Image (cartoon, helix red, strand yellow):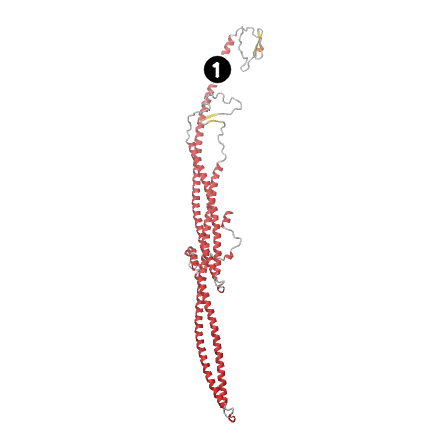
């Protein structure tokens, strides 16, 4: 028959170990080791029984006190956790509201910047259309000037003058080509700025879409209730309870697990945000600043392009005024030469008629002088038939000899005068041929100048906008005109300046 012996601690917390050896119990320590072994091993004494009961009661009371303390602490912990949860929910809700307000403001600023960029793009496209129209308006005048210049090259060699019109046409050609070069450069710069503005606008619109998505998500997060029923998803553990959490944190190194609506979260750090608020707001502000700077550059480019178009029109208008003045002077000079030449032709014709009349008169006088010479010769021959004793050099003989000599001299003089008249007539005939040829040449020159009127009409249409805005005295004191030869060789184009700004 085996016997069971209770362990009776000598002191609270210091248990003795009693071993049975034969009929005796031997203790390994405690207060019982200081006294003789108990010889009564078949039952316990009353005081031992009372002591054990008293100790059990005391242990129960201590456990009840500890449980009451833990209950109060748990209640305080639950209340504190509820208060902190409510406060945290209020703070997080307020933070979400503040973030929504901040995001909405940024979204509004981004949308305004995108709208301004849209307006700037529209204005830049209008400027591009104006620049392209200005480029197109230069092509027809350039072709017209080249055609007139080629037509003037078909003049006769004697009429190929280095006159002011030729200089004006050359300068006009150089000016129109320079205008085309500058306008093409401006158009290239405008196209580059348009692409830059579209890229900035696309970045702003993408940020607006991101902000709208963030606002929708934050609004949904703000609308979440402070407490909601929990339903465990498929494959997830059931709702937490004290029974299921009795081993909570018991395993060494095990991670804390909290049930959520979407499953289990293995860490309290549920989200790693790569950007801080300063970076987040700074990125949007940087986009707005870049868009504003791009809009400012585009506005300056539009202003520069507008001034370029006006300045080129002003320079072309000045050259057109010079060409009009030189054209009128050339036409007047050609007409004056034609009129003067025709007057000389008429005078030469009249002189030729007078020469013909004088030649006829000289021939008649020569005929008359021949008759008188015959009479004088016959009279002198008749007196030569006198008797020899009467052949005397008397006054009559000398008078007849003088008459004959004077008649011969007069006839020779008449013949010489007639020869000179005929030479003058021949020379006048050559002069008349030259004058008529001059009239033909100048008439041909005048016809070529008349052929330049369509070119003048085209140039007038080109400078019509400038003529409507320039004062009447602009042709005399225009501040925009300058010689093309004074332009620097290494001048930079507008597109290069705006591409490397």
Q: Identify the residue under disc 1.
A: 60
Judge whether 437 appears above or below 318 on screen: below
Total labels: the figure holds 1
Q: Quadrant of residue 101?
A: top left
Residue 80 picture location, percent across and down: 45, 26
Residue 233 picture location, percent across and down: 44, 25
Residue 310: tell me if it is visible: no
Of residues 195 and 286, which is closer to you in this image? 195
Residue 191 picture location, percent across and down: 47, 47
Q: Quadrant of residue 337?
A: bottom left
Of residues 477 and 422, which is closer to you in this image? 422
Of residues 73 and 106, which is closer to you in this image? 106
Judge whether 264 appears above or below 146 on screen: above
Residue 418: tell me if it is visible: yes
Judge whether 354 appears above or below 202 on screen: below
Of residues 24 and 380, which is closer to you in this image? 380
Judge whether 270 appears above or below 119 on screen: above
Residue 23 picture location, percent across and down: 57, 6
Helix, strand or loop at label 1? It is: helix
Residue at point 45%, 81% (across, down): 367
Q: Residues within 10 Å of mark 1 (few under 14, many from 20)?
A: few
């Amino acid at each position: 028959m085996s016997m069971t012996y209770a362990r009776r601690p000598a002191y609270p917390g210091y248990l003795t170990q009693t071993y049975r050896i034969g009929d005796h119990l031997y203790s390994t320590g405690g207060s019982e080791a200081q006294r003789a072994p108990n010889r009564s091993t078949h039952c316990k004494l009353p005081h031992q029984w009372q002591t054990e009961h008293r100790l059990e009661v005391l242990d129960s009371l201590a456990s009840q006190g500890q449980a009451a303390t833990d209950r109060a602490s748990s209640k305080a912990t639950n209340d504190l956790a509820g208060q902190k949860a409510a406060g945290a929910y209020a703070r997080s809700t307020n933070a979400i509201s503040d973030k929504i307000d901040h995001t909405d403001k940024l979204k509004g600023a981004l949308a305004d910047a995108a709208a301004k960029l849209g307006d700037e793009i529209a204005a830049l496209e209008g400027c591009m259309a104006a620049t392209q129209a200005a480029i197109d308006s230069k092509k027809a005048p350039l072709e017209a000037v080249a055609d007139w210049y080629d037509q003037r090259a078909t003049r006769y060699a004697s009429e190929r003058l280095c006159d002011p019109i030729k200089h004006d046409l050359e300068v006009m050609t150089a000016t129109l080509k320079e205008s085309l070069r500058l306008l093409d450069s401006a158009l290239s710069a405008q196209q580059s700025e348009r692409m830059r503005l579209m890229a900035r606008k696309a970045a702003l619109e993408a940020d607006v879409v991101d902000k709208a998505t963030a606002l929708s998500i934050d609004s949904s997060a703000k609308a979440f209730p402070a407490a909601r029923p929990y339903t465990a998803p498929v494959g997830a553990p059931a709702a937490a309870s004290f029974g299921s959490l009795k081993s909570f944190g018991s395993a060494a190194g095990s991670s804390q697990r909290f049930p959520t609506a979407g499953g289990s979260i293995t860490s309290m750090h549920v989200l790693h945000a790569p950007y801080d608020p300063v970076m987040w707001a700074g990125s949007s502000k940087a986009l707005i600043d870049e868009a504003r700077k791009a809009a400012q550059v585009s506005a300056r480019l539009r202003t520069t392009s507008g001034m370029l178009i006006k300045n080129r029109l002003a320079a072309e208008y000045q050259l057109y005024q010079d060409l009009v003045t030189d054209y009128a002077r050339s036409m007047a000079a050609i007409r004056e030469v034609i009129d003067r030449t025709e007057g000389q032709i008429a005078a030469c014709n009249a002189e030729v008629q007078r020469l013909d009349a004088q030649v006829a008169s000289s021939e008649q006088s020569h005929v008359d002088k021949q008759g008188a010479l015959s009479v004088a010769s016959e009279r002198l021959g008749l007196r030569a038939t006198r008797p020899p004793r009467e052949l005397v050099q008397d006054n009559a003989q000398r008078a007849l000899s003088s008459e004959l000599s004077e008649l011969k001299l007069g006839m020779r003089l008449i013949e010489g005068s007639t020869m000179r008249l005929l030479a003058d007539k021949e020379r006048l005939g050559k002069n008349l041929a030259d004058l008529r040829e001059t009239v033909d040449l100048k008439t041909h020159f005048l016809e070529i100048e008349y052929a330049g009127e369509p070119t003048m009409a085209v140039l007038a249409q080109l400078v019509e906008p400038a003529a409507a805005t320039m004062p009447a005295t602009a042709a005399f004191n225009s501040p925009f005109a300058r010689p093309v030869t004074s332009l620097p060789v290494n001048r930079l184009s507008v597109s290069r300046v705006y591409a490397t700004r």
